Image (cartoon, grey):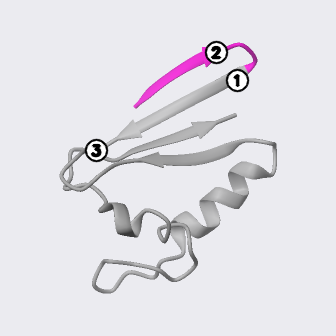
Amino acid sequence: MHAYVSGEQVYMEASDNGKGIPDELMDQIFIPFFTTRKGGSGIGLSLARPVMQIPNGSLRVSSGEGEEITFILTF
């Protein structure tokens, strides 16, 4: 986890060392009930993004297949 301030924005970045998200799935990960996990519900990210947008924040993701996944929360 890494946090920093730039201007009036606060950023938090959380990364993993997993297998990454293929480019063809990146547009789908925030869609309700989309999951690639066996037994997954697909509601976590679909709820997290609107919660971050309530106070004019954002939730973004950066990844590629075979790369780490980084989620960037902006407050």
Figure quadrant of the C terminus: top right
Q: Which disc, if any, is residue 6?
A: 2
x and y percent of residue 34 in the render? 47, 80
Residue 16 falls within the magenta-colored stretch:
no
Q: Look at label 3 and name its amino acid.
A: Asp
Residue 69 placement (x, y as % from top left): 33, 47
Specify the amino acid type for callout 1: Gln
Whether residue 48 is situated above or below residue 63 in the rendered picture: below
Badge 1 element:
strand
Cα–Cα gap, marks 3 and 2: 23 Å
Q: For mark 1, does the 10 Å Cα neighbourhood hold few (<14), some (14 to 19), or many (20 or more) residues?
A: few
In which quadrant of the rendered image does the N terminus lie? Answer: top left
> In whole angstroms, how far apart are the C-alphas of marks 2 and 1?
5 Å
Label 3 neighbour load within 10 Å: few <14, some 14-19, many 20+ = few
Find residue 55 and report its horizontal and vertical position in percent.
Answer: 81, 44
**Image coordinates for residue 31, horizontal then vertical, percent:** 56, 74
Q: Earlier in the sequence, mark 3 or mark 2?
A: 2
Q: CA distance from mark 3 to mark 1?
A: 23 Å
Q: Which residues are magenta?
A: 1-8
In the picture as drawn, the residue positioned furthest to the top comes out as 7
Residues under numbered marks 2 and 1 in contact, where contact means CB atoms less than 8 Å apart = yes
**In the rendered image, the vertical position of residue 44 relative to residue 51, given as above or below:** below
Residue linked to disc 1 = 9
Q: Which residue is mark 3?
A: 16
Q: What residue sits 23% from the left and 46% below the top?
A: 67
40 vs 52, left or right, is: left
Report whether 17 appears left or right of 27: left
Kind of residue at disc 2? Ser
The residue carrying pointer 2 sits among few (fewer than 14), some (14 to 19) or many (20 or more) residues within 10 Å by Cα, namely few
**Marks 3 and 2 in Cβ contact (< 8 Å):** no
